[in-house]
Amino acid sequence: MTVSDLKIIASNGGGMILDAQSISASDLKIICSNASAKQATVIIKNSSALSSSDIKIMASNSKGYAIFDFCN
């Protein structure tokens, strides 16, 4: 599955669990924003791999529909 596919799935309302170590922060921002427009939840595992500023932007863009997993 490509990142482009994930963006389309999110825009269609598909929720998903993603790994921050395998998808860039810029792509995760878009996926979170697309998913929130359809009220779909995105869970981001390994969130500690992201910068705090990226997490803040994703949280803001997702309007509460992003869940960040900081557990290892």
Image (cartoon, rainbow, N blue to C red):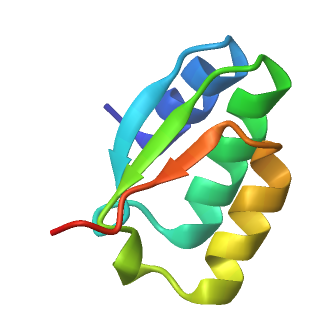
Number of callouts: 0
Q: State the image coordinates of residue 41 (x, y, percent, origin top left).
A: 58, 29
Drawn side of residue 68 relative to residue 33, left or right:
left
Residue occupying the point 55% across, 15% down = 14
Determine the residue positioned at 48% across, 68% down.
Answer: 24
Q: Position of residue 72 (x, y in %)?
A: 15, 69
Of 2 and 63, nearer the camera is 63
Relative height, residue 53 to residue 14 (above, below): below
Q: Which residue is pictured at 47% across the width and 80% down the height?
A: 50
x 56%, y 19%: residue: 9
Q: Quadrant of residue 13?
A: top right
Q: Report the residue that reaches farthest toward the left.
A: 72
61 vs 66, left or right, is right
Question: Left or right: 32 with respect to 57?
Answer: left
Q: Quadrant of the N terminus?
A: top left
Residue 21 x %, y %: 29, 69
- Between 2 and 61, the one nearer to me in the picture: 61
- Residue 31 position (above or below residue 38): below
In percent of width and height, residue 12 lies at: 68, 11
* Residue 34, above or below 63: above
Residue lying furthest front in this view? 71
Is 47 or 33 nearer to us in this picture? 47
Residue 20 sits above or below residue 42 on the image? below
Q: Quadrant of residue 39?
A: top right
**Which image quarter: residue 28?**
bottom right
